[in-house]
Image (cartoon, rainbow, N blue to C red):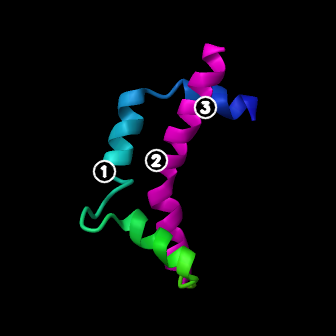
Amino acid sequence: MKSILSVVDQLNWGIVIILCATLGLAPFSPPHIVEKLSMLIKGNLIKPLDWFDLLLHSIPWILLILKIVASVIRGK
């Protein structure tokens, strides 16, 4: 886990935020990630393409969360 956080810590904040704003939210009305998460909660996420979409659109958000965690750990 420590090696993953060190790699994520080296990513530029601006790039991670741009990824979240573009790939993480595209298409913008409604954001695709919101649609896929609601499908997951309702149990309607059954097609492999839907799972791939969820993974693809959630990667920027996962990177952002890991970057925040790495920043907090480094700060302590």
Query: How far separated are the C-alphas under marks 3 and 1?
Result: 22 Å
- The main secondary structure of the magenta stretch is helix
Which of labels 3 and 1 is toward the front? Answer: 3
Quickly name the residue at label 1. 22
Quickly name the residue at label 2. 60
How far across and how far down the image is residue 21, in percent? 32, 47
Contact check, label 3 and label 1, Cβ < 8 Å: no
- The three-letter amino acid code for the residue at tag 3 is Val
Contact check, label 2 and label 1, Cβ < 8 Å: yes
Q: Is 59 inside the magenta-drawn segment?
A: yes
**Rendered view: 49 above or below 1:** below
Q: Which of marks 2 and 1 is nearer the N terminus?
A: 1
Quickly name the residue at label 3. 69
Outermost residue on the top side: it is 76
Tell me where the magenta segment starts and ends, as one range.
47-76
How far across and how far down the image is residue 22, in percent? 30, 50
The quarter of the image holding the C terminus is: top right
How far across and how far down the image is residue 24, in percent? 39, 54
Give the side of residue 38 with respect to residue 26, left or right: right
